[in-house]
Amino acid sequence: MASKPPVSAATHCPYCALQCAMTLGPPDGDAQAVGAPVSVAGRDFPTNQGGLCQKGWTSGQVLRASDRLTTPLLRGPDGELRPATWDEALGVVADRIRQIQSRHGREAVAVFGGGGLTNEKAYALGKFARVVLRTPYIDYNGRFCMASAAAGANRAFGVDRGLPFPLADLGGAQAVLLLGSNLAETMPPSVAHLAGARASGGLVVVDPRRTPTAALADDGAGVHLQPAPGTDLVVLLALAHVLWAEGLADSRYLTSRTTGAREVRSSVSAWWPERAEQVCGVPAADLRAVARLLAAASPARGGHGAYVLTGRGVEQSAHGTATVSAAINLALALGLPGRVGSGYGAITGQGNGQGGREHGQKADQLPGARRIDDPAARAHVAAVWGVDPRDLPGPGVPAVELLRRCGTADGPRALLVHGCNLVVSAPDATRVRERLAALDLLVVCDVVPSETALLADVVLPVTQWAEEEGTMTSLEGRVLRRRRALPAPQGVRTELEVLHDLAALLGVPTGFPADPAEVFDELARASAGGVADYSGLSHARLDADQRGLFWPCPATPAGSEPHPGTPRLFLDRFPTPDGRARLVVVEPDSPSDGLRPDAPVHLITGRVLQHYQSGAQTRRVAALAAAQPEPFVELHPLLADLVGVADGDLVQVASARGEAVAVAHVTPGARLDTVFMPFHWAGPGSVNRLTLDTTDPVSGMPDLKLCAVSLRPAPPSAEPPADGLGAVGRGAR
Ligand code: SF4
C-alpha cells in the first residue's frame, strides 16, 4: 500500500448515488490507529448542503465491521472455507481459469461487476475481461438498477447521463413530477431541492404507496397519484394526451428540437383520462389537473420551470424502457429538456451507478460509454490497450441472461464477482443460487462474508471505500474524488492489485497498474472522443477542484484553458445524428406476473431509510440494524383482516417462484390490493425469493419491482426472518 493516509479526508459517502460529501477522521486524531473509531462529519457540497442521512452518519462503522475479511479463503474438500495465503489463493484462481478455458473455451469464464465500484475498478474489470480472459461474458448489477433509464435516454437523447443537469437546479422549479422514487427515504438530503416545487404546490409523486415522499406532496404541497402497480405508463400516456388535447404542448419546441412528435401525439390520443382511469385507478380529474399543473410550470407557458424524474419504481420492470420513454415523451411535449431550470432525469441509485456503466463493465459497452459493436470504438480502445481490435470480444449478454447460463453446458463454468451480493439482490434468488452452485469455480472479492461470498470456492478480501483512492461519478454526472482516510486492515488488497496479480499469472504482465491515478489516466484516454468523455480529467485536477467536474470534460490542446466540464447537457443540441431529441411511440402491456386466484395480491419492492441494497454493509451497523432489524411486509388493515394477521405477526408471502416470511406492518397508506416488502435481507425474509426474472426486451432490466403473491399467517414452524448474517464456513455450495 502507498503512502500514509492523512489525519482526516474529504471524501464522499460509500452508499448511494447522491454521494454526499463528508469528512472522515478518528476523533482522537490518530488516523493510523488500527481499529480506532472513525468519525463522520457532513461536508458542505451543492447536493447535500452538509447533510447526511442515518446511513451516512453511521458509515464509519462499516469500516470496523467485526467480521471483516482479512485473509483469502479457499473451500476445502470438506466443503468448508479455510484461510489461505494470497499466493495460494491467486494461484488456485489462475490455475482453475486456465483449466476451464482450455477445456471449454474462453467464454467459459464470466465476470460480474457492481455499481459501487470506483471508476478505476470498473474500468480495470472491463479491460481484464476483454484483454486477459477475452470473454464477452461481463455484466454488472447496474443492469438491475439503471438499465431501463439508460436505454430510454440513449434512444431519445443519444446519451445516458442520469441527470443531465445539476441536482440543485431542481430548487428553482415550479413543478416536479417524481415517478417511482422515494427520495425522502433513499436520499433524504436531496429533499431540500424539492422545496421550490413544494412551495408552489407543484410536487407530484406517482407511487402506489403513500411513502414519506408521497406524504411530502399530499400535505398541500402538491399531489400524490396512487396508481395500480405496473400502470405508470398509462398515467404518463394520459398526461401526454391531456397536453395535446388541451393545446398545452410546446409546439414550437417540438418542431424545432425533436422528431417523432406527430406519431406520439397520434398514439396518445387513445388514452383519454377516463379510459386511463379504468386501467390505473387514478381519477381522470386528477390526471387532467396534473397535466395542467405541469404545463403551467413549463417555460413555454411562462412558468418557472418543471422537471420529470423517474426512479426504480417505474424502471425495474419488463416494460421499464417503455415507461422511461413515455416520461421523456411527456417532458419533450412540455418543452423541458435542454432548457435551464427544466428537464428530464433519472435518479441513479447505486453509489457509482453512473460511472460504473460508462467504463466497460456493461456487456455492450467499452470505456467512454462506447458501443462495443462499433468498429471505430473498438479501434480506439484497442489502441489504448495495445491490442488488436479483432481480439476484443463482441457484446456479451445482460446480467439476468448471464446468470441463467452459469453452469449450463454451453455457458460459463467460472464466475468472478466484484462488488455485488448476487444471491440477495438478483431476481428469483433461489434460481440464482442454483446456477452459482452449478459452476466449477466461483470467486468473490468482498469486504465482509456476504451471502454470496459464503458460497464461493475462493474469497478474496479487498479494501473498501475509505481505504482506497479513486473516483466516483454521482447521479448528476459529476466526477468526484474518493479519498483514502485510513489504512486497510493487514492482509487486505485493493481490487486493482488483485487484477494486476491475476493478469500477470494469466500471462499479461503489463497493462494492469495498481495505482488508481495511473488507471484513471488510462481510462481518460480510453474515453476520449466517446459520449462520456473524461479525457480532460485527472486525479490531480479533481483534487484541485473540490466540487468535482461534470462529464463530458474533453482534453484541450496543450497551453489552452482546461475544459470546464458540462453541468448542463442539450442546451444547444441533442447528441443525436440530427441534433434532435426523439419521441418514441410506446404502448402499455400487461404485467409479466398478473393477479390470479392463487396469487391475488400485488407485491411491490423497495428500500427503507436505514438499509442499502443487499444490506451486506448496513446490516452490520448496530444503529441501523436496531432501527430496522428484520424484513417486513406492509399491508392495508382490511387486507390484514382478510389474511388473518395483526401488526407484528409473521406472514408467509408466496409467489410462483418461492416463499418468504416477514413481519406484518399494518398501515392505511398501503393500497388494498398491494403489499410492499423491502429487499435488504437474506434468508427466509429475502424478497427476491419471490420476484421474477422476466426482462425488458430493450434494456435487459428484470421485473424486480412487481409480482403476484398470496398471503397467509406464517405456520408456527416457519423460520423467523433472520438478519441473514452468517459465519465464515457456512453456506457450502
Ligand atoms: Fe447521502 Fe445517500 Fe449516503 Fe445517505 S446514503 S448520506 S443520502 S450518499
Image (cartoon, rainbow, N blue to C red):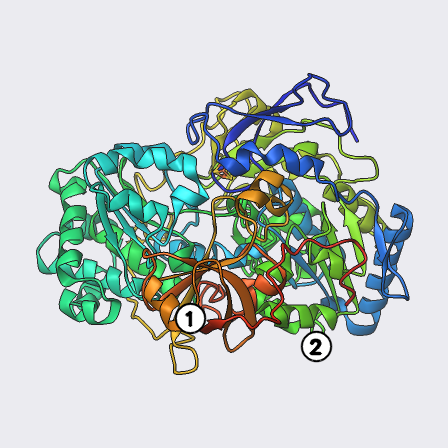
Residue 644: mark in rendering: 1
Is residue 495 positioned above or below 230 on the image? above
Q: Position of residue 583 (x, y in %)?
A: 28, 59
Q: Residue, x 28% and y 62% (percent of image)?
A: 227
In the picture, measured across the screen, residue 460 lies left or right of residue 402, that is right
On the image, the x and y values in percent for residue 180 come to 36, 54
| Residue 28 visible in rendering | yes
Between 485 and 128, the one nearer to me in the picture: 485
What residue sits 64% from the left and 41% below the top? Answer: 120
Q: In this view of the protein, can residue 521 be seen by the observer?
A: no
Q: Which residue is mark 2?
A: 408
Asked if disc 1 is less than 8 Å from ligand 1, the answer is no
Which corner quadrant holds the N terminus?
Answer: top right
User: Against 187, is 153 above or below?
Assistant: below
Q: Quadrant of the C terminus?
A: bottom right
Query: Marks 1 and 2, how far apart in space?
Result: 43 Å
Would you identify the image quadrant in which residue 518 lies? top right
**Residue 241 spot, x, y in % from top left:** 16, 62
Q: Which residue is at the far top? A: 29
Query: Mark 1 Cα within 10 Å, few/some/many (few <14, many 20+)?
Result: few
- Give the vertical position of 447 relative to 206 (above or below): above
Q: Could you say which disc has been placed on residue 2 in the image?
A: none
Mark 1 or mark 2, whichever is nearer to me: 1
Label 1: which secondary element: loop
Count numbered badges in the picture.
Answer: 2
Disc 2 residue type (three-letter): Thr
Determine which quarter of the picture holds residue 149. Answer: bottom left
Residue type at the position of mark 1: Gly
The correct choice, above or below, for 510 with respect to 549 in the image is below
Q: Position of residue 408 (x, y in %)?
A: 70, 77
Q: 513 or 32, which lies in front?
A: 32
Upstream in sequence: badge 1 or badge 2: 2
